[in-house]
Image: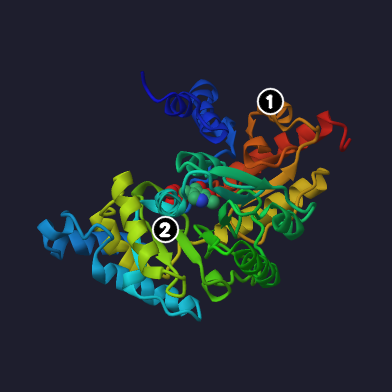
Amino acid sequence: MINEKMFELGSKRSAIRDLFEYAKERGAQIGAENVFDFSIGNPSVPAPDCVKEAILDLVAHGDPVALHGYTSAQGDPQVRAAMAAHLSGHCATQIGAEDMYMTCGAAASLTISLGALVCPGDQVIVFAPFFPEYRVFIEAAGAECVVIPPREPELAPDLEALRAALNDNTKAVILNSPNNPSGVVYSEETIRALCGILRQAQEEFSHPIYLISDEPYRELVYDGAQVPCVLDFYDNTLICYSFSKSLSLPGERIGYIAVSPRAADNRRIYAAVCGAGRALGYVCAPSLMQQVAARCVGKTADISVYRRNRDRLCAALKEYGYSFARPDGAFYLFVKALEPDASAFCERAKRHELLLVPSDSFGCPGYVRIACCVRPDMIERALPAFRALAQEYGVIE
Ligand code: PLP
């Protein structure tokens, strides 16, 4: 007898991974340049030079035993101090090395945070549209995933629905801004209002309700959009961060958790984070990458490419009659499918070699996600296919 739930998870790929694999197979059949793969959020922009420089310098001049050895379970103290100093520069709240836990990317940050907080019978609230792995992580931690549908068309969190969903079993709320899959950046006003509602609920139910702020796209914002520091607005906050997108290092698996120094029971939460890391086997994040992250924290890959991709796609898709909320951040477009069934729409798009992700697993039916972190030349080659698809649905002539 094996764990059937895990068997199910491992046997069925996510819609995103499914398309990503299909793109490779299809590319082998008809040539990769003829497949328009908008499925996965894999940055197409190389890591900034500082990453290569740091790796070369560390490998050439670092102590090889220490460099490739175990660090402290929660991460090298100096690396954690560097992360804390950088985060403190972004926030009014001052964070210490003792609040930081280095992880293997945002996925590990989330699973550790949930593992640290969740008890049997708890609920964790997510705002649709949401990163589909949230449901997997929440359920694996033993909690129920409660989905709040968005306010449309702007795809902002529905705060009245949040108020109604909070109850004695609510342990945490996951917030993700800039958002995957919509690219929407939540305003400071929204964050303040949301935090006010959570504070009221904490009083009403007489227990902490944690805000888990998942921020792998924090630096990926355009046209002056601001990402407020959630630590400044709500005490019981854990930040889950990753260098996967900002430094274009998704394969290197490096990120962190910051536990708010203002959280009630901050030391107990931090110890539970260490405990969850231990229980999940997520101790001692990749040692070389911890050092690289410490040297490159605050730098980004050339994200102007994503802005230009967004602008090009938004202009063309608007012209072809598609509707969407123009994203201020991340590198996704969340577009209304041209028929109610997003999966059926994606199947038709596939006939034009356009690989788009149907939105059902994002908790928001009727849309498709288009990852704009692709190479600009692929966008140019794909535009006739987007146009032909719109023509097929009679949206344009
Ligand atoms: N959270 C969100 C919103 C994401 O989009 C992703 C990856 O795409 C992750 C978490 C996981 O990030 P990582 O690759 O750093 O584990």
From this view, report whether residue 98 is shown above or below residue 346: below
Task: Between residue 33 and residue 204, name the one nearer to us.
Answer: 204
Mark 2 falls on what kind of element? Answer: loop
Number of the label disc, if any, that sits on residue 132: none
Left or right side of 12 for 66 = left
Q: Which residue is mark 1?
A: 347
Mark 1 falls on what kind of element? Answer: helix
Question: How is this picture coloured?
Answer: rainbow
Q: Amino acid at mark 2?
A: Phe
Q: Which residue is mark 2?
A: 243
From this view, report whether residue 148 is shown above or below residue 329: above
Q: Quadrant of residue 383?
A: top right
- Res. 326 in view: no
Lower position in the chain sequence, tag 1 or tag 2: 2
Left or right side of 73 for 357 = right
* Residue plotted at (15% across, 54% down): 69
Q: Is mark 1 within 8 Å of ligand 1?
A: no
Task: Between residue 285 and residue 208, name the one nearer to us.
Answer: 208
Task: Between residue 372 and residue 261, name the one nearer to us.
Answer: 261
- Asked if marks 1 and 2 touch (Cβ < 8 Å), the reply is no
Q: Quadrant of the C terminus?
A: top right
Left or right side of 252 for 137 = right
From this view, report whether residue 250 is shown above or below residue 348: below
Q: Is mark 2 within 8 Å of ligand 1?
A: yes
x then y, percent, for residue 360: 67, 36
Q: Quadrant of residue 203?
A: bottom right
